[in-house]
Image (spheres, helix red, strand yellow):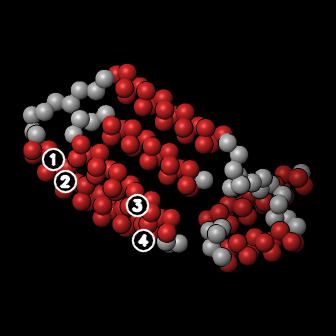
Amino acid sequence: MTLYFFISATAMLLFDSTLTPHPLILTIKVISLSTCLCMTLSIFSLWYAYMLFMVLVGGVLILFTYTSSLSPNAIYHLKPQTSQLAYNLFLTLFSALLITPTPMIINTHNQYQHPTNLIIFFFLVEQEIFNFHGMYLSVINNHRNNHSQSK
């Protein structure tokens, strides 16, 4: 699901970049998004990619001030048809990614109540595939389901 979010966010930002007439902005966004995506996919800790993204945002801000000082009086006009098309493409892509069934979408109502599934659950926590926030949400969900079934 995270990969789908990255793909749709990248597509949305690239569609947004194509609406600007300055090619430097598109180049900066493509380089920063591809670098952050590669770092996120290659390193198991997301903090490294997050910090790299923050450094890249700082660099982009510096380049933005440089670009804005080059053309201070230029007025950027957006065609309404182009922006509407980009917006519709983003919504279509994102909703299609959310609707399609993926292995990450699991029915979590009763799957961790059996002992074998509980062992698999703790194995996933041990391997850091299933993070602690997800574990707490699953425990709360199971707790709510148990109380709702007992009433």
Using a 10 Å C-alpha cutoff, classify the residue at mark 2 as few (fewer than 14 neighbours), some (14 to 19) or many (20 or more).
some
Q: Pick whichever, 126 or 30, lies toward us.
A: 30
Q: Secondary structure at mark 3?
A: helix
The amino acid type, in three-letter code, at marker 1 is Thr
Using a 10 Å C-alpha cutoff, classify the residue at mark 1 as few (fewer than 14 neighbours), some (14 to 19) or many (20 or more).
some
Please give the name of the residue rendered at 85% of the width and 65% of the height, measured from the top-left corner.
113
The amino acid type, in three-letter code, at marker 4 is Tyr
Mark 1 lies on residue: 67
The amino acid type, in three-letter code, at marker 3 is Cys
Which numbered disc flags the more N-terminal residue, 4 or 2? 4
Please give the name of the residue rendered at 28% of the width and 27% of the height, measured from the top-left corner.
78
Mark 3 lies on residue: 36
* Residue 46 locus on image (x, y percent): 48, 68
Mark 2 lies on residue: 63
Residue 76, image quadrant: top left
In contact (CB < 8 Å): disc 4 and disc 3: no
* Residue 45 locus on image (x, y percent): 50, 72
